[in-house]
Amino acid sequence: MPNIWLTGAGVAFSCGLNATLPLLILALADRITSHIELQDPFDFLSSNAGLFILMLILPIELIADKLPQIDSINDLLHSALRPAAGAMAFMAIGSQESGTSAWITGFLGLAIAAVVHAWKMRTRPAITGATRGLGNPYASLVEDTIAVAVTIVSLVSGWLALLAIPLGVAWLGRVYSRIVAGKSRFIRLFSPRSPT
């Protein structure tokens, strides 16, 4: 039972960073492994139609999130979508175990994804301002990497999510603060200004 809840928390955390990637990974895990068995109606995610929709939406989110100014609009539009994705992911994972309340898992998934999304959304304008937009694609790439890693690790074992979530938070916090403070070596490589 705790394993399901921890797995749901890990995938919901990832949905706060990217609404589509974790759902796509969850759908593929249901489709190609026996470890994840989504129940009706959540098995729609791994149907041909569900996979098609997710793969259609994914490039739009990935590209928009890496463009300065556009990413802030994208974040605003995703203020409902990312928490909803977190709720759906947590409910889908909880559906594998009988007796799990869809209301509780939905609320927890929504809350976790909403907190992560709010952190991301609040930080992005500071990154844009500090780097003139140069840091946006880098921050987005790190967010996508963390979303993929935490989702995969959480699906392998919910207990690993206990380690993956704090590590993801720490890595993301470090990247955000270093970019805003002008200490990111990656950003300075491409910056037209000489480092101070």
Image: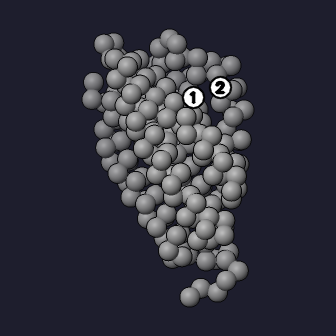
Of residues 7 and 75, the one drawn nearer to the viewer in this rendering: 75
Secondary structure state at the residue bearing disc 1: helix
Q: So how many labels did they put on this image?
A: 2
Of residues 30 and 13, the one drawn nearer to the viewer in this rendering: 13
Q: Indicate whether 3 appears above or below 92.
A: below
Name the image quarter holding residue 196. bottom right
Which residue in the structure is indicated by mark 1? 28
Which residue in the structure is indicated by mark 2? 51
Name which residue type carries label 2: Leu
Side of 66 relative to 29 (left or right)? right
Badge 1 local density, few (<14 within 10 Å), some, or many (20+)? some
Badge 2 local density, few (<14 within 10 Å), some, or many (20+)? some
Name which residue type carries label 1: Leu
Q: Position of residue 92 (x, y in %)?
A: 46, 22
Of residues 90 and 116, the one drawn nearer to the viewer in this rendering: 116
x 50%, y 39%: residue: 15
User: Does residue 151 appear in the picture of this structure?
Assistant: no
x 49%, y 35%: residue: 83
Secondary structure state at the residue bearing disc 2: helix
Q: Position of residue 17 (x, y in %)?
A: 52, 45
Q: Nearer the viewer, mark 1 or mark 2?
A: 2
Q: Counting residues from the N terminus, which is met first, the one under dot 1 or under dot 2?
A: 1
Q: Position of residue 178 (x, y in %)?
A: 48, 70
User: Which quarter of the rendered picture does the N terminus lie within?
Assistant: top left
x 56%, y 49%: residue: 144
Pick out the residue farthest to the left. 2
Instruction: Tell me the tag on residue 145.
Output: none
User: Does residue 167 appear in the picture of this structure?
Assistant: yes
